[in-house]
Amino acid sequence: MSGLELYELRKELGITQGDLATHLGYFSNGIPNRSMIARFENGHAKINARIAMLINQYAKDCKELADV
């Protein structure tokens, strides 16, 4: 998954960087670390296979909730 793909998926789902950071467990001083998501989207940090799997599962869950 590329940063652009992550950005587009996040926008399609209507979730914020903070929402995704919370789901992935990225926190700084107890606050969701959305800067890590921005680093992924801007290509400054690599999205490894494990993170991509978690993002895809979260996207699937969000889509299923939207259909209910």
Image (cartoon, rainbow, N blue to C red):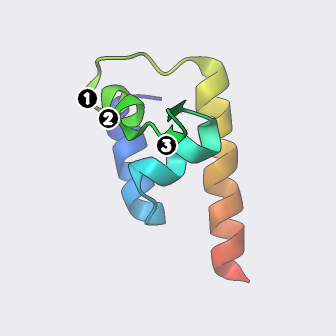
Q: Which mark is residue 11?
A: none
Q: Position of residue 32 (x, y in %)?
A: 49, 43
> What is the crowding at mark 1: few (fewer than 14 residues within 10 Å), some, or many (at least 20)?
some
Q: Are marks 2 and 1 in contact (CB under 8 Å)?
A: yes
Q: Position of residue 17 (x, y in %)?
A: 41, 48
Identified by mark 1, the residue type is Asn
Q: Position of residue 57 (x, y in %)?
A: 70, 46
> What is the crowding at mark 2: few (fewer than 14 residues within 10 Å), some, or many (at least 20)?
some
Q: Which residue is mark 3?
A: 32
The picture quadrant where one finds residue 53 is: top right
Identified by mark 2, the residue type is Ala
Q: Are marks 1 and 3 in contact (CB under 8 Å)?
A: no
Identified by mark 3, the residue type is Pro
Q: Which secondary structure lies at badge 1?
A: helix
Residue drawn at x 38%, y 28% is 40
Q: CA distance from mark 2 to mark 1?
A: 6 Å
Q: Which secondary structure lies at badge 3?
A: strand
Q: Is residue 31 above or below residue 53?
A: below
Tell me if I can see residue 9 in this picture: no
Viewed as shown, does residue 51 lie left or right of 2? Answer: right
Q: Viewer-nearest of labels 1 and 3?
A: 3
> What is the crowding at mark 3: few (fewer than 14 residues within 10 Å), some, or many (at least 20)?
many
Tell me if I can see residue 65 in this picture: yes
Q: Viewer-nearest of labels 3 and 2?
A: 3
Q: CA distance from mark 1 to mark 3?
A: 18 Å
Q: Which residue is mark 2?
A: 38
Q: Is residue 45 above or below residue 16?
A: above
Q: Which residue is mark 1?
A: 42
Q: Viewer-nearest of labels 2 and 1?
A: 2
62 and 25: which is toward the camera: 25
Q: Are marks 3 and 2 in contact (CB under 8 Å)?
A: no
